[in-house]
Amino acid sequence: METIVSIKPLLAVLVSSIGAIFIISARKNPNLRESWSIIAGVLKLFIVLSMIPTVVYNNIIIEYSLFTLLPGVEISFRVDTLGLLFAIGASILWIVTSFYSIGYMRSTNEHSQTRYFACFAVSLSTTLGVAFSANLFTMFLFYEGLTLITYPLVAHKDTPEAKKGARKYVIYLLGAAKAFLVAAIILTYNLAGTLEFSKSGIFPALVQSAHPNLLYLIFILFLFGFAKCAIMPFHSWLPAAMVAPTPVSALLHAVAVVKTGVFTVLRVVLFIFGADLMMEIGVDVFAITFASFTIIVASLIALSRDNLKARLAFSTISQLSYIILGAALLTPSAIIGSIIHITNHAFAKITLFFCAGSIYVSSHKTEISQLNGIGKKMPWTMAAFTIATLSMIGIPPVSGFITKWYLVIGSMERHSVAVLAVLLASSFLNAAYFVPIVYKAFFREGDSEAKHHEINGHENERVKEIPFMVVPLALTAIVSVVLGLYPDFIVQMAESVIR
């Protein structure tokens, strides 16, 4: 495949970190500070979109190298269709989340807003660094950088509960990296002599036949080392991180952290091992088993949670494993479903978290049992919630249906009745823990107008939706429908990954 050298990947990575400097410099002027966040997001998106003609339509790989540490170990960037698709979604959602954050932070009068917006910006730099990494070493550096820069976001409220959740977050993610990921990278380099990504995999045939058990172990180390994918049993950091403000939860679940986790697993499956080697050593069955277990068990736990963000957290754990399951099936349709679910799930899940934040800010309600009649008071918020719910379940015409269609076809290509059963059962469970929320909101009687909660210090104030928060969640809900009606672009990008 043809390659060209361009500085664009580096610029796309750096622009939000440079924006963070301007955000900090404008800390005494909230309007200017927030404007810098939006400006940096727009510039990042412009740079990312400018690479589409080269990568997607001309089928050319964009590369840029900074420096070499050892033979086969360098800090370098490589933009292919897989990384570009991930980067497009993250860049768009950063802008949307920035607008939402402005409304949320001002409405709740959160402290340390400059720190929040600055860390948010740098986290997008590290996310795109992962997306555009040319090798495991570069990806590892940005992956760990993302963990460190999001720690202040998780601990943002500075309460004992927030600090405890943030500690668990960072211990799990850094601990898994040190215990498993570093070992996997060292073993990979010693066996393959390189850490560069390759479509055919990087392990030579001699190594494949001589060290199948060692290769099996290396894959397990990668799967659990990339703990951001939240596969069970390395998942409990994610519910603990829900102590963060809702925009941070949206960042964790849709834009950056967990998507980085499953993206790195996709890189390992497709560009380090390759489909042939995965099946030859039988590690695909291991991944399918753990992913299927996570999908079902996390869904069952979600059913038992009354707190809205907690239910959404366990839903995320389940939905992430669809991506791992699709990749591990190793059939063309399943891999396509896996890749497009990164984007489809991102827009639907960020909508759900935006809605949770909108409900909290407008009504101070956090429990599902408190949501009777909320749909009549917050129609735009709950309409968007309903659309995102349909996507999670996999009902047309919303984008989640496209994902599940490809995964179901992939399970049939694999001739796996067990995986098909998991997919069908999980869709029923999705409906079981989401539909009651919609039913309560629209079809149950809520409190009378005389019994409104105290909001922002004013008794009996009517519940009002905040435009700065409602517009972003409406837009992400609309995009979920558009991706369901017109999925060709992301499907074509996913297809080019496996050609």
Image (cartoon, rainbow, N blue to C red):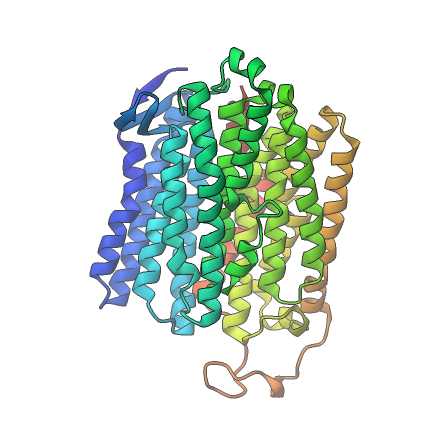
Q: Residue furthest left?
A: 25
Query: Quick check: 88 above or below 382?
Result: above
**Is 249 on the left-hand or right-hand side of 37?**
right
The image shows residue 90 at horizontal and vertical percentages of: 43, 44
Q: Is residue 80 left or right of residue 486?
A: left
Q: Nearer the viewer, residue 91 or 366?
A: 366
Toward the viewer: 153 or 350? Answer: 153
In the depicted structure, whether residue 444 falls above or below residue 351: below
The relative height of residue 31 versus residue 126 in the rendered view (above or below) is below
* Residue at screen point 24% across, 48% down: 18
Which residue is found at the position 27% from the left and 67% from the top?
Answer: 30
Relative to 290, 494 lies left or right: left
- Label total for image: 0
Residue drawn at point x = 42 percent, y = 53 percent: 96
Residue 95 horizontal/vertical position (percent): 39, 51
The image quadrant of residue 396 is top right
Q: Quadrant of residue 49?
A: top left
Residue 256 appears anywhere in the view: no
Residue at horizontal 28 percent and vertical 48 percent from the top: 17
Furthest-top residue in this view: 206
Question: Where is residue 458 shown, x and y percent of the image?
Answer: 47, 86
Viewer-closest of 442 and 222: 222
Question: Residue 307: x, y in percent?
Answer: 62, 67
Q: Is residue 354 left or right of residue 298?
A: left
Report whether residue 324 is seen.
yes
